[in-house]
Amino acid sequence: MIELQNISTIKNNQSIDLNEITSLSYNDFFDLTIQLFQQQDNHCLTYFAYKKDSGLQFIMAVGDDKNHNIILLSHFLKSSDKQELRSLSEKIFALHIFESEIYENFGVDFLNHPWLKPVRYAHNRFNKESQISNYPFYSIRSEELHQVGVGPVHAGIIEPGHFRFICNGENVLHIEIQLGWQHRGIEKLFLDKNNNLQRNLLAENIAGDMVIGHTTTFAQTMESLAGKYVTEQTQIERALAMELERIAVHTGDIGGLCTDAAYHLGANVFTILRTLIINFTQLWCGNRFGKGLVRLGGTHFPFTPELKEELLEMLLKFEKHFNEMAHVTYRLPSIQNRFDFVGTVTQKQARLIGTVGIPARMSDIKRDIRVSHPTFAWQKFPYQTITAEKGDVYARFLLKKKEIAKSIAWIRNLMKNYQFEASKTEKPNYNLSLQPEKLAISINEGWRGEICHCAITDEKGELKHYKIKDPSLHNWKALELSLRNNEISDFPINNKSYNLSYCGHDL
Amino acid sequence: MINEVKVIYHNGKQYIPDLRNVKLRAPFRGRPEISTAKVDEQSLVDICPLGAISRNPVSIDLGKCAFCGECAFAFPQKIKFTQDYKLSSNIRENLIVREGENHPILFDKSKIRKEIKNTFSRSLKLREVSAGGDGSCENELGACGNANFDMGRFGIEFVASPRHADGIIITGPLTENMAEPLQICYDAIPFPKIIVLVGVDAISGGIFDGSPALNRIFLDKYSIDLYIPGNPSHPLTVINGLLDLTR
């Protein structure tokens, strides 16, 4: 059996030769993975398969949060062998979604998988007979229970997804979330389009509410494949934009939660405060969501001293109004009563399903890429993770407020200690030549949680595989668990408190 | 209570009084203008990641444009993005901006169905369906109703059920998996009803054009009443488009 210290490891935003990745037999891979996940500091960043030569190449990336490393493991399944493997999910449930995805895409059967179901009905799935209209829902036979189906088209202006509740009266025993409606074939498009500007635009459209998060991760992945890194200022600008995105969306979410708790003053005020932030982003790059800001190799929109002045002024105004409104909102008995002890996910459950981002930190799990695998900006300007304990809607509501304050403080510190000059940036460069036979991986803490992009090149330096992981992939399960033994009418506040991505999941 | 009154007082009036004439600041990218300057047209055409630019004459199809601005960065003497946010039209061809023709995007009022003006000019309720939308257009449609843009003042609102709606507003490139739910939703809306496409993804498929995961047959079956370009469409673009259509 291979020793742990002999496994291939890299750092965030680095690339590695494909033949340097530790390759194991499935039995060794199985044992080693179980050994790795006994450490609480290790969690799975991504686990996927792609077609190679005469079989399937499996790659797993494990984040070692303590030592700031990414551990890479691989195994190979020949197409002449029986297409079945012993499921790891039985032992490590957090891997369930990755195994399900491989099962759906390639038809590999994972024996004893507790919940082997279609993930997103991708257009290139293995079994075309499996249709989104006949998803195998979990059901309980009883005369006292009833089912409630909601979606895919919802009452609000949101993306589509189907929720199936099994209820005993008002009480939810089980909810199953069926996704896939948003599937656009985006991972395949990264390979089909050989123009890097097109790929850059694709990355912006992975999830339109986390544009900076995904596009930055994409750019870092491609840049490390090319072995060309952007200037320090550009890296810092990307981090700044990511924090602004976090403040904007968290503020909107707090407003949304107020709407769902029928507190209209809070709903209105927080929504207009979000406008301040996204209008600043528009002033910076011309788009309220930051589309156009992050580009391969450089930027069209360097952060200038004039922008710095406007930003600091805007933050001052934002903070004043935000704190005044929050002071009222967070003390309201009706809000506290509505959110407290609703939709609780315990730390044990959160660890089991492998949550990331706020859904991890709400249960006192210190999982934060800015701290555990910091990119340059967060190495230079460190960030301290904050957590909550209760894991309920109120914990998520509170954490969003606290993270806004933290991000503002981080930005102020950055503004005070860094000199922005347009001359310290470069124009975008789409003519990257990628190194052949490499794997590059990049992770970032977007506002929704951990984003992971992984790209692999072939012997000619063309993209062979592009794998995206949106944090929602892990976190949808948390929403399902939240609803158990809650009233069905608590669904909207739970859903809003997570604000998960449909298109990021469906890709 | 007193603290809440203070909040209201301190935030003041937030709505934009005249949504027709807002001055947006650069670098916001609205309607482009194409000069008659001579440039290497082929490389201009090639630079567009979405194939929105054509030659003879040089033109940009806003139905295909993601407003990324790459063409203007490469050929600043040829292409300039103005801050004009009124980008919508009821005619697909009118979204094409040609060189030397610097005029607002035109609405052909004579082509608007009579029943639209008669029925919806004072109240329009819409059902939004996201069919592969990335969330940004959806967010902007939500923002149309907030205290800043306050689309409700015109009697235009989004409703929870197609049964309550006068029309459907579609975002996203229309995925195969959403084809059936979209059709069901449209069928459930009573006549007369309108169809509005919001965002480059809905109008032309955008960066997803040609993906095998899409199914855009729905758009071939019906005539579209309004095209609202953008990536995503700014709330001002959306509201002005809807107003031009209905009044």
Image: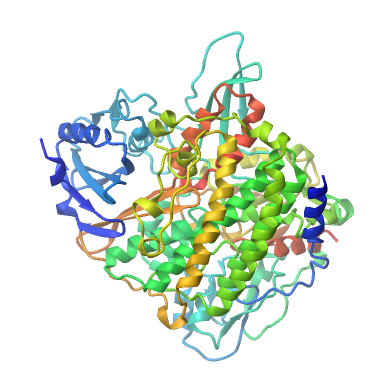
**How many numbered marks, from 0 up?**
0
**According to the image, what is the colour scheme of the structure?**
rainbow
Q: Residue A230's spot in the image, x, y percent?
A: 36, 71
Task: Kindly give the residue lying farthest to the left in the view shown.
Answer: A1
A444 or B230, nearer to the observer: A444
A494 or B191, nearer to the observer: A494
Q: Residue A462's spot in the image, x, y percent?
A: 27, 62
Which corner quadrant holds the N terminus of chain A? top left
B243 or B105, nearer to the observer: B243
Q: Residue A315's spot in the image, x, y percent?
A: 61, 64
Task: Kindly give the residue lying farthest to the top in the view shown.
Answer: A143
Asked if residue B175 lies left or right of residue B239, the reply is: left
Asked if residue A425 lies left or right of residue A223, the reply is: right
Task: Kindly give the residue lying farthest to the bottom in the view shown.
Answer: B38
- Say if A284 sits above or below B145 in the image: below
Asked if residue A131 lies left or right of residue B184, the reply is: left
Residue A490 visible in the snapshot: yes
- Say if B225 sits above or below A391 in the image: below
Residue at 72% x, 70% y: name it. B86
Residue A132 visible in the snapshot: no
Residue at 29% x, 46% y: name it. A66
Image quarter of residue A435: bottom left
Q: Residue A220's spot in the image, x, y percent?
A: 36, 62
